[in-house]
Image (cartoon, rainbow, N blue to C red):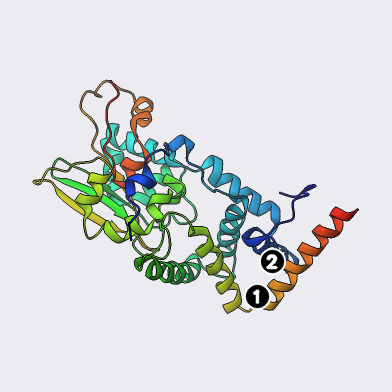
Amino acid sequence: MKPVSLEELFVGTPLEKEVTFSAPWEARAFAMAVRLSESDICTWDEFRHHLIAEIGKADKVRAHGWVEDGDGYYTYFLRALENLLREKNIVDASALEMKMREISEAGHDDHEH
Amino acid sequence: MSGNHVTIPTGAALRVKALETILEEKGLINSAALDSVVDMYETKVGPRNGARVVAKAWTDPAFRKRLLENATAAVAELGYGGPEGGHLVAVENTPKVHNLVVCTLCSCYPWPVLGLPPVWYKSFAYRSRAVRDPRGVLKEFGVEIPEKVEVRVWDSSAEQRYIVIPQRPAGTERMSEEQLAELVTRDSMVGVALVKART
């Protein structure tokens, strides 16, 4: 594979133009992890272990040249957050699926009105 | 973030919205608190904080000493602290040593003084090569470190996060602390750039 050079990632993003989050959901996911780690629910270190695991998985795939570098970080971040909440028995996969359907359907209903 | 959104979230945005809704229903988070976290990292906390720390270290020898001894306490004097800044370590560049900071496993970074890390810091390319080939990595950033200068690489963790105190450029002797802070870049505080005096 052709590795992405640091220059490609680096050049063209002067500090003042660099955005902290490239989509609102990234910011929400980040903020949720921060708030949860400030509460009794988890420590930042616990979250970090899940994050390291997700990034590690992606690194392995990337080392084989199957994934592009430079984005995807918040995808791993979100997976880590979901894994943490599942491990803590706070949000399981089916509850999440159900809520997603609910939000999606409510959105479509609104549109028909 | 509430209001009359007509866009129906899909993909990751939908997952996040669902998570947030569930956590809010359980009373574990509230949207306003999330707004304030986002606002803080988008507008308030950033590398300008670190630049002020560096400029003060350049102009105030007693502060520099305190910073090198206990960076967490020293930056708290300027009002900087909070999550992910608990164990801050300041490492100083000298004519003999150049410091470079990485987090090989994920993205640990000294948030209170530098804000959130840039994309390249989180990239596989940087994380996988900074320890193995720091001089090569620095060259890609346009920084040539002479052979006689030792390059030290610091791998960040949840316990230890680093800020590099770059070398003060020559010709800045008459500049004020505020003017000096203007010269300090984020990249110089991670160790992938040098501070240059503006001509």
Residue B75: horizontal and vertical position, in percent? 40, 45
Q: Is residue A65 above or below residue B145?
A: below
Q: How far across and how far down the image is residue A66, in percent?
A: 41, 66
Q: Quick check: A110 left or right of A83? A: right
Q: Cα distance, mark 1 to mark 2?
A: 8 Å
Subunit bearing disc 1: A
Viewer can see residue B66: no
Residue B96 location (% of width, % of height): 13, 44
Pointer 2 residue: B23
Q: Judge by depth and name the residue closer to the eye, B4 or B49.
A: B4
Q: The residue under label 2 is which amino acid type?
A: Leu
Between B184 and A100, the one nearer to me in the picture? A100
Q: In the figure, A24 relative to B186: above or below? A: below
Q: Residue at x 62, y 61 (%)?
A: B12
Q: Residue at x 22, y 60 (%)?
A: B132
Residue B114 visible, this orientation: yes
- Element type where label 2 sits in the image: helix
Other residues around mark 1 within 10 Å, as few (<14) / some (14–19) / many (≥20): some
What amino acid is at disc 1?
Ile
Q: Is residue B196 above or below residue A96?
A: above
User: Relative to A84, is B156 on the left or the right?
Assistant: left
Using the image, tell me which numbered label, if any, was put on residue A90. 1
Vertical position of residue B106 compared to residue A23: above or below: below
Q: Are marks 1 and 2 in contact (CB under 8 Å)?
A: yes
Using the image, name the chain to which the residue with label 2 belongs: B
